[in-house]
């Protein structure tokens, strides 16, 4: 007769389902992006997912792990999806392939595969190509429909740019954050915001993309896939910084631009919440999220890069184990929580 | 200012600094001295205290003293690999495999058992037992206090009628516990080979 | 309900499918008499009970079969009348599947009660409130009552809380585990018993209030309890508190937190915060004991699961085989058979069904594979933290998992591993299907084992050190004595040299004195012994026995001292005479004396050997060796004596001894061969029986063989010489 340890029953949850739900929750964002910016991101996502699955399979084969067992956990696919969404829509194919395979091989499998990576794989891949190919990464953002309807590339145009090396110039333009960063050097904030790229609330395109990710994120919260701690702390951290330093309207970007442009919402709900590399204790999650929000603001406002989700997340990944060690919850029946790391042996 | 003066000033500053910091360190080492457990005691705490003498010393404490004086850490079969590992950690040396010359590690703990109807009451085992775990008097039957027996085997040799067995300690309900799960990703494919030896 | 009870919440918890309706469709049925009852002596936490009946003895229903061993232990009673057919090791319901001592009772079918007056009758009182709480507690202990909720802690021990004042009694009727409905049905059908039991508990504890905690998924039980409370006019004294259904609200610590908002201190007991928590089943058992004199010999057990055609609750005699209950419930064995004792969250799967129902068996769950599929292969932990959200103890289960898996027990302990109540909520929610609880059980077991080993080695160290100290002391004493003797001898010598006649005269008189003393002491011993015997025989003088024993011992010690003195005096006398003639050790007289002593010794040894042979003792071989040795000594002594008489050279004597040596060796070899044969025989027997002793025996054989070869070599050398 079967004698296994209790419990003998199990909830219907599984890692594959969790990952699949996260992937599905990105669909609103992907849909809006495709509608407003053309097929570039859609193609990127497909390409990144294919690359992620292929590299994952290859490395699993080399590591002599069972392919089916690990591929069906959907984590590689999720890494691919997140990278595809994060990369510029018109980035050449090799950038996507390079970023994805680096993420899977170096940031995930070499650390021992699922569950063992100290850094968010997608963001490691993103940071690699951002640092290595700054030109390709900043000139391949598509112009949103709202700004120039004729500039939105069709499917064939996107394919040509991404795979055949056609010039993206006809379709590309700076992102709002990028544009702001360039113009704020010579103009005041209010002057910058008069530029057509920032034309009107709910009119530009990036707002809609971020709102779509927010919607997806709320679904994740509702399904209890993620807890509220990290996204809320991150958005609050970012907002507080923005309000605190935003007293000088001529110097700094307004709160709405911080929250609803760039990768803010994608980062808050889909990237910072990657459980493997994030802090795990409830209070730790708050600190971790707030840290990302603050770093995000600091790098956007004072750093060399227009957006900074990848760097902010990676930097806080470093701190996650340390944060966990100092934020353990108080256990039932104990007066106070234990803090910090443990001495090797106490007698 | 001549070069010489510069050098002299530099040297003087360094000397003063060295003196000051030396004094601070010296003071700190006296003021904040931590009374550590003597190393022999720490080693002795790690040794299994079977007092079997297989290491070549008359008991665990003497071996602990010998280790503190630089003897090898791999002479204790009852402690086995885990004791060697702990000693290596404590002393900051490389763990070595158990020295086969002193015997092999037992798979299961044992206790001595005297077949009492064969015992002739010679008291030889009583004299041999390092932890006084055998009861009896001359010409009276002897018996082992199983609770106190360390399973060192020292009583087996002297028995003139070979009535002492070392019997493995069985598991009862109070000492039984669940083993760690073995199913799961750990035992798949390549990992399994390392369990069964090199492929 | 008159008081408004504020409900608190506990951290985490889960909502697994309840699956309680299957077994509440039928009322409680009587499971009847099985062919055999298996009664483990250890059905509770604490020390096992000690059997007090013999195999073959006929016992009556309710008769005590085993008594408690200490405070944390409970006795065991016969669930029905019948014959004790065995007292032996039997498999008991435990996750390990190991055996423990059980009393096996074959019922005679008459179900005949022995004397079982209720406590009220015994004390001739009409109401339990006239009984001292202490008496009630002792009675509850005598009735074999241990916690019926699952853990089985001796109830009496839990009620002895003198050092802590108790303000609240909590009756646990939450029954939060899926499938189990034993308490639910008990409350529905025997609510009155529960309330009356609770009244007794209140009286014992002197608590101001009583809270009955019950989950809101048991409306019938709630109604029944309300009615019972009204019936006993207790509705103002006891509060029925309905708590929301959430697993594990029935955990003692969780229920206390739910109802009082307070936490039981880590490593402590509820009494420390003025609370005692008892299961409703225990309250009912207390009622039956106090009012009806019925010891704990039966309990309500749920039998459920899709593999049972007729799930329901059974009033089951303790010791009833699981297979009997399953059969009654229409159990259909499945392809991958699984029967769980307890619920799906905390129960354990039974290795087979020939196991008895014990005092803590609240449920037998026989699920089909579709119903409760066995766990999938575990995937890697992705640190999602769902376990931490579900943990009612507010632990970090995934951290504990990493530490347990890596066997970093130190860190696991630092992360409060021992506060884990093994409720299984973390495993239930884990998306990677990691058997977390099993890891914690492993880590806890390993830590406990390590602690035990540590304690043992600490004790071994102490014993070794005290042995060394003792040996040193003995050595020192010996040394001191030797010195004293040497000094005395030197003095005597000096004295003898100075005035030999006086000394010679003096010594015997000294000896006489000592002898007289000895006689007196011996007489005293005889007298004391007589007195002691008389005291032992007479109960009224019992208290004198220890004093007499002490006196006896003292006199005996005195005798020994005197004997020693006498021996010393004799020696001193001998040395004075010896000093006078100053004979050399090789003088013929001396050698003759030596020879004679050896001969006497040989005779004794031979006598002993003959006795042993007659009685067929195993010591024959050893004694034979002794005789051989003695014989050799006699021959040697004789040779030496003869040599000295003849004045021949010592070399001749040696030669004579050498031949003798050879003979002795040959004899020894024969004896050794005998021993070897015996050892081999033993080994073969052990091998045939497949005993564990085989390696030890084969070692013994090879050792014997070694000895034999050694002897043969010696012989060859001797012959060669």
Image (tube, coloured by chain):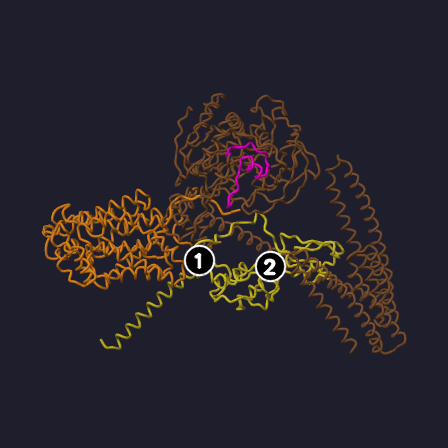
In this rendering, position of residue B14 left or right of residue C496: left
Q: Quadrant of the C terminus of chain C?
A: bottom right
* Chain B tint as drawn: yellow
In this rendering, position of residue A74 left or right of residue B58: left
Name the residue tied to disc 1: B188
How crowded is the residue under tag 2: few (<14 C-alpha within 10 Å), some, or many (20+)? many
Looking at the picture, how far across and down is residue B87, in whole percent?
Answer: 51, 62
Which is more toward the observer, C236 or A13?
A13
Chain identifier, colour orange: A
* Chain C tint as drawn: brown
Looking at the picture, how far across and down is residue C186, in whole percent?
Answer: 51, 30
Image-quadrant location for residue C356: top right
Residue B184, compared with residue C337, is above or below; it is below
Name the residue tied to disc 2: B50
Q: Do the residues under discs 1 and 2 have CB atoms within 8 angstroms? A: no
In the structure shown, which secondary structural element does the residue marked by tag 2 occupy?
loop
Looking at the picture, how far across and down is residue B145, in whole percent?
Answer: 66, 52
Instruction: Specify the segment rendered in magenta.
Output: C310-336
Is residue A262 located in the magenta-colored stretch of the structure?
A: no
In the structure shown, which secondary structural element does the residue marked by tag 1 occupy?
loop
Q: Quadrant of the N terminus of chain C?
A: top left
Residue C199, compared with residue C311, is above or below; it is above
Judged by depth in the image, the label closer to the viewer, 1 or 2, is 1
Q: Is residue C435 at all visible to an observer of this figure?
A: yes
Image-quadrant location for residue C126: top right
Q: Is residue C162 at all visible to an observer of this figure?
A: no
> Which chain is disc 1 placed on?
B
Which is more toward the observer, C687 or C704?
C687
Is residue C317 located in the magenta-colored stretch of the structure?
A: yes
> Which chain is disc 2 placed on?
B
């Amino acid at each position: 007769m079967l004698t296994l340890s209790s419990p003998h029953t199990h909830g219907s949850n599984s890692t594959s389902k969790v990952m699949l739900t996260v992937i599905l929750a990105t669909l609103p964002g992907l849909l809006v992006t495709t509608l407003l910016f053309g097929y570039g991101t859609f193609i990127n996502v497909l390409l990144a997912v294919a690359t992620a699955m292929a590299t994952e399979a290859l490395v699993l084969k080399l590591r002599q792990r069972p392919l089916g067992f690990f591929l069906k956990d959907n984590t590689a696919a999720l890494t691919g999806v997140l990278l595809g969404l994060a990369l510029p829509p018109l980035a050449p194919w090799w950038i996507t392939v390079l970023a994805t395979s680096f993420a899977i091989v170096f940031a995930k499998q070499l650390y021992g595969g699922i569950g063992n990576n100290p850094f968010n794989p997608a963001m490691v891949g993103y940071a690699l190509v951002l640092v290595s190919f700054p030109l390709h990464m900043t000139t391949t953002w598509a112009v949103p429909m709202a700004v120039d309807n004729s500039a939105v590339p069709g499917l064939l145009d996107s394919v040509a740019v991404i795979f055949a090396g056609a010039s993206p110039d006809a379709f590309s333009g700076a992102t709002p954050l990028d544009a702001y960063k360039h113009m704020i050097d010579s103009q005041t904030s209010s002057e910058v915001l008069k530029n057509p790229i920032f034309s009107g609330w709910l009119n530009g395109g990036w707002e809609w993309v971020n709102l779509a990710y927010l919607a997806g994120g709320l679904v994740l919260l509702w399904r209890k896939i993620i807890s509220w701690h990290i996204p809320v702390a991150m958005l609050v951290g970012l907002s507080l910084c923005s309000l605190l330093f935003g007293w000088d309207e001529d110097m700094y970007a307004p709160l709405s631009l911080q929250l609803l442009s760039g990768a803010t919402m994608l980062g808050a709900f889909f990237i910072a919440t990657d459980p493997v590399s994030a802090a795990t204790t409830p209070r730790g999650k708050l600190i971790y999220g707030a840290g990302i929000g603050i770093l995000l603001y600091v790098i956007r406002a004072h750093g060399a890069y227009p957006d900074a989700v990848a760097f902010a997340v990676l930097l806080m990944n470093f701190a996650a184990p340390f944060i966990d060690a100092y934020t353990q919850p108080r256990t039932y029946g104990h007066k106070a929580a234990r803090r910090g790391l443990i001495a090797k042996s106490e007698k | 200012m001549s070069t010489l003066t510069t050098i002299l000033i530099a040297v003087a500053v360094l000397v003063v600094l060295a003196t000051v910091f030396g004094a601070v360190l010296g003071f700190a080492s006296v003021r904040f001295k931590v009374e550590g457990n003597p190393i022999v005691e720490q080693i002795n705490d790690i040794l299994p205290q079977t007092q079997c003498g297989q290491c070549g010393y008359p008991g665990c404490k003497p071996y602990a003293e010998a280790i503190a004086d630089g003897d090898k850490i791999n002479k204790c079969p009852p402690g086995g690999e885990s004791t060697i590992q702990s000693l290596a950690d404590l002393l900051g040396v490389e763990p070595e495999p158990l020295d086969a010359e002193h015997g092999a590690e037992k798979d299961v703990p044992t206790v001595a058992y005297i077949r009492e109807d064969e015992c002739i009451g010679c008291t030889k085992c009583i004299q041999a037992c390092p932890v006084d775990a055998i009861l009896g008097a001359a010409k009276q039957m002897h018996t082992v206090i199983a609770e106190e027996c360390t399973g060192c085997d020292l009583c087996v040799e002297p028995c003139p009628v070979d009535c002492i067995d070392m019997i493995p300690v069985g598991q009862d309900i109070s000492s039984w516990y669940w083993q760690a799960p073995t199913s799961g990703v750990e035992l798949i494919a390549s990992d399994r080979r390392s369990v069964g030896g090199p492929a | 309900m008159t008081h408004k009870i504020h409900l608190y919440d506990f951290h985490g918890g889960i909502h697994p499918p309840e699956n309680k309706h299957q077994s509440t469709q039928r009322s409680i049925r009587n499971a009847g008499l099985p062919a055999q009852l298996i009664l483990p002596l250890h059905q509770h936490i604490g020390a096992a009970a000690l059997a007090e009946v013999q195999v073959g003895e006929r016992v009556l229903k309710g008769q005590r079969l085993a008594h408690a061993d200490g405070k944390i232990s409970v006795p065991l009673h016969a669930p029905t009348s019948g014959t004790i057919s065995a007292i032996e090791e039997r498999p008991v319901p435990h996750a390990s599947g190991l055996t423990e001592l059980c009393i096996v009772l074959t019922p005679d079918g008459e179900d005949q009660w022995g004397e079982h007056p209720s406590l009220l009758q015994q004390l001739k009182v009409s109401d339990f409130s006239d009984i001292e709480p202490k008496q009630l507690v002792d009675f509850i202990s005598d009735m074999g009552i241990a916690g019926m909720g699952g853990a089985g802690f001796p109830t009496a021990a839990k009620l002895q809380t003198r050092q802590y004042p108790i303000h609240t009694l909590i009756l646990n009727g939450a029954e939060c585990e899926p499938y189990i409905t034993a308490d639910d049905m008990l409350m529905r059908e025997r609510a009155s018993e529960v309330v009356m039991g609770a009244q007794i508990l209140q009286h014992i504890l002197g608590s101001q209030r009583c809270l009955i905690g019950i989950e809101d998924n048991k409306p019938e039980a709630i109604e029944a309890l309300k009615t019972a409370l009204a019936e006993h006019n207790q509705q103002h004294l006891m509060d029925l508190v309905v708590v929301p259904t959430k697993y594990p609200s029935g955990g003692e610590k969780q229920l206390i937190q739910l109802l009082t908002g307070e936490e039981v201190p880590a490593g402590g007991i509820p009494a420390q915060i003025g609370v005692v928590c008892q299961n409703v089943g225990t309250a009912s058992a207390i009622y039956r004991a106090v009012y009806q004199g019925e010891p704990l010999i039966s309990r309500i057990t749920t039998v459920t699961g899709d593999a049972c055609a007729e799930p329901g609750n059974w009033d089951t005699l303790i010791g009833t085989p699981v297979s009997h209950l399953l059969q009654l419930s229409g159990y259909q064995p499945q392809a991958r058979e699984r029967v769980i004792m307890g619920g799906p969250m905390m129960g354990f799967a039974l290795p087979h069904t020939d196991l008895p129902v014990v005092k803590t068996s609240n449920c037998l769950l026989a699920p089909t594979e579709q119903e409760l599929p066995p766990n999938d292969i575990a995937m890697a932990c992705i640190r999602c933290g769902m376990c931490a959200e579900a943990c009612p103890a507010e632990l970090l289960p995934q951290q504990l998992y990493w530490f347990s898996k890596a066997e970093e027990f130190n860190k696991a302990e630092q992360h409060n591993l021992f506060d884990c109540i093994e409720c299984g909520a973390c495993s239930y929610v884990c998306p990677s299907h990691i058997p977390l609880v099993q890891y914690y059980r492993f880590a806890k077991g390993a830590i406990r084992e390590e602690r035990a080993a540590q304690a043992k080695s600490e004790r071994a160290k102490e014993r070794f050190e005290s042995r060394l100290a003792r040996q040193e002391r003995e050595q020192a004493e010996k040394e001191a004595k030797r010195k004293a003797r040497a000094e005395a001898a030197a003095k005597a010598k000096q004295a003898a040299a100075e005035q030999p006649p006086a000394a010679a005269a003096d010594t015997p008189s000294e000896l006489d004195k000592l002898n007289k003393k000895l006689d007196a002491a011996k007489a005293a011993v005889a007298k004391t012994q007589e007195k002691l015997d008389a005291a032992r025989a007479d109960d009224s003088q019992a208290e004198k026995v220890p004093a007499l024993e002490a006196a006896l011992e003292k006199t005996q010690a005195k005798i020994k001292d005197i004997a020693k003195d006498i021996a010393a005096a004799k020696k001193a006398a001998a040395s004075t005479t010896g000093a006078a003639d100053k004979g050399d050790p090789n003088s013929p007289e001396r050698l003759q004396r030596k020879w004679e002593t050896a001969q006497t010794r040989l005779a004794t040894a031979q006598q002993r050997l003959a006795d042993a042979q007659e009685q067929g003792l195993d010591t024959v071989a050893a004694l034979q060796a002794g005789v051989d040795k003695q014989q050799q000594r006699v021959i040697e002594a004789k040779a030496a004596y003869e040599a000295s008489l003849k004045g021949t050279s010592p070399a001749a004597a040696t030669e004579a001894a050498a031949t003798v040596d050879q003979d002795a060796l040959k004899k020894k070899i024969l004896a050794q061969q005998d021993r070897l044969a015996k050892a081999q025989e033993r080994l073969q027997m052990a091998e045939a029986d497949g005993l564990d002793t085989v390696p030890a025996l084969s070692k013994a054989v090879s050792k014997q063989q070694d000895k034999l070869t050694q002897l043969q070599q010696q012989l060859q050398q001797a012959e060669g010489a």
